[in-house]
Image (cartoon, rainbow, N blue to C red):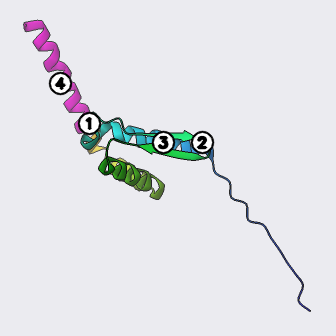
Amino acid sequence: MASESSFDIVSQVDRMEIRNAIQQATKEVRTRFDFKGSTAAIEETGDDLVLSAEDEGRLKALRQILEEIRAGKFTEALSDEEASGYPRLRAARDKSRKLRVESARRRLLG
């Protein structure tokens, strides 16, 4: 006679990982042109994530951002950026510096 066996599978969610994903998604939303002026947001309420946006297109984009974070695409892109010497970061930093210098020049010269 076959013996009866049982086992339980326990799955726990790492709340810190969820918060990190929300923060990463929020940063992405703030920098994307298609979200400029948007009130799109992701909130953690208890065991749920609540996504809100002005329209279905932005809501779909918000879901896609979370999916890319879950799949590790942002981490992969960061690793690629690091391996190539951070060219996008350097370009953004240079652009920011030029804008600050130009702004200061305009203030000084009127």
Q: Is residue 66 left or right of residue 104?
A: right
Q: Amino acid at mark 2?
A: Met
Q: Which residues are magenta?
A: 91-110
Query: How many residues crowd mark 3 within 10 Å: few (<14), some (14–19), many (20+)?
Result: many
The spot of residue 44 in percent (x, y) is 54, 40
Mark 2: secondary structure: helix
Picture residue at 12% right of the left edge, 7% below the top: 108
Q: Is residue 79 visible?
A: no
Which mark's residue is nearer the viewer, 1 or 4? 1
Mark 1: secondary structure: loop
Q: Is residue 72 visible?
A: yes
Comes first in the chain, label 3 or label 1: 3
Comes first in the chain, label 2 or label 4: 2
- Residue furthest to the bottom in view is 1
| Residue 99, disc | 4
> In this figure, which residue is indicated by the disc labeled 2?
16
Query: How many residues crowd mark 2 within 10 Å: few (<14), some (14–19), many (20+)?
Result: few
Cα–Cα gap, marks 1 and 2? 28 Å
> In this figure, which residue is indicated by the disc labeled 1?
36
Comes first in the chain, label 1 or label 4: 1
Cα–Cα gap, marks 4 and 3? 30 Å
Which mark's residue is nearer the viewer, 4 or 3? 3
Mark 3: secondary structure: helix
Cα–Cα gap, marks 2 and 4? 36 Å
The spot of residue 64 in percent (x, y) is 38, 54
Along the viewing direction, whichever of 18 and 41 lies nearer the viewer: 41
Q: Main secondary structure of the magenta part?
A: helix
Cα–Cα gap, marks 3 and 2? 10 Å
> In this figure, which residue is indicated by the disc labeled 3?
22
Q: Amino acid at mark 1?
A: Lys
Q: Amino acid at mark 3?
A: Ile
